[in-house]
Image (tube, grey):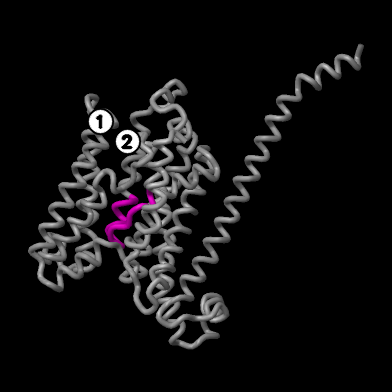
Amino acid sequence: MNSNVCVSLETSQAPERAIHKRYQASIRKKILVFVVLAVLLLVCAVADIAIGSGTLDISQVCNGLIHPSQVSPAIQVVLWEIRMPITLTAVVAGLGLAISGSLMQTALANQLAEPFTLGISAAAGFGAAIAIVFQTSIIGLIGIPIEYVIMLNAFSFSLMTVLMIAFFATRRDFSIEMIVMLGIAIHFIFSSLLGITQYIADADQLQSLIFWSMGSLAKTNWTKVYINCAVVFLSLPIIFFHSWKISALRAFGDNAITFGIPVKRIRMLLLLLSALIAGCITSTIGIVGFIGLVAPHVTKILVGEDQRFALIITALTGSVMMTMASILSKVIFPGVILPIGMVTSLIGVPFFLWLVINKRRGI
């Protein structure tokens, strides 16, 4: 009798054990993906530091980073004043743009959403263009260097765009589709205005404008690294605190309200954080596309939709992609550094087309 009860109990618990094993296996897979991406990011970062106009060997890079006094002053300057800011900017910018794209896709329930979609990048580009072409702004009047005037103008315009979108997003008669269409309209308006400023710019200004609008890591410095780190890493705790709400929002959309989630408020919070991060990064390195679009989709393929893991994997994927793009920008044409936005577009466009084709096939 007792043996029959035990057999019956074990049989009834078998499905639970199978589910538990599958869950443990999925956790191990996500941890493995995290470790692989972290190692890949470290390798890419060291390679990015080593590669440049005068390529350094790995021992010089490691000694220069761990024991700076054991390398020559010239190598110290190259490592710490030129290449480290570029590599760290690539890591933080990739992380921020990827997270920004993921949040925007969740907030707008649109897999093709990213900072480009809502016109944030175009607005930042026009703000920078005004500062470059007219060399003026209220901030400039109080003696701030033009480099930071460009950055602040770009951020101001991206912030104004966010506030305008946030205003319309709070209106009940505006659906998510209408917000996306509004963003596309804003993108074309600012792109047109950017074209006008390019038309009236002189040769030197036009060169700066084109260089900025294609995105560049070459003019970064430690101040820009600190600014980007401050904005991104102050936003991350808020994002991770709401990770389970983000998971529910991605899985159930507006129906997540049945779990007690204030859907509209969370969408607005995600939108504002996304725009804040993207606006800050764009204002420091120029317009860089496709990282925010591609990284969340790569993450979805690797680990699924559980945002407790997906947010971290998305951040790492964005950093790896941006660092690899930085390396490619220096090796495609030796001796010439290509604009980083051009390289990310070359990487991102094939994936975007693959995504569109699969969407059409319903995969």
Figure check: 143 above or below 349: below
Q: Is residue 150 left or right of residue 87?
A: left
In this picture, is 69 found above or below 202?
below
**Within 10 angstroms of label 1, few (less than 14), some, or many (20 or more) residues?**
few
Query: Closest to the observer: 271 or 129?
Result: 129
Residue 278 lies in the magenta-colored region: yes
Q: Main secondary structure of the magenta part?
A: helix
**Number of numbered callouts drawn:** 2
Placement of 246 over or under 293, stated as above or below = above
For label 2, the SS is helix
Q: Earlier in the sequence, mark 2 or mark 1?
A: 1
Residue at position x 18%, y 56% in the image: 127
The kind of residue on which mark 2 rests is Met
Q: Looking at the picture, how far across and down is residue 147, in whole percent? A: 23, 68
**Which numbered dot is residue 158?**
none
Q: Position of residue 1 (x, y in %)?
A: 92, 11
View extreme (left): residue? 200
What is the three-letter code of the residue carrying label 1? Thr
Q: Which residues are magenta?
A: 277-293
Q: Are marks 2 and 1 in contact (CB under 8 Å)?
A: yes
Residue at the location (41% across, 66% down)? 326
Per the image, the residue denoted by label 1 is 170
Can you identify the residue that label 2 sits on? Answer: 268
Q: CA distance from mark 2 to mark 1?
A: 8 Å
Tell me where residue 207 sits by quadrant. bottom left
Q: Depth check: 211 or 247 in front?
A: 211
Q: Give the x, y percent position of residue 131.
A: 15, 63
Residue name at image x 25 percent, y 30 percent: 170
Asked if the magenta segment contains residue 282, the reply would be yes
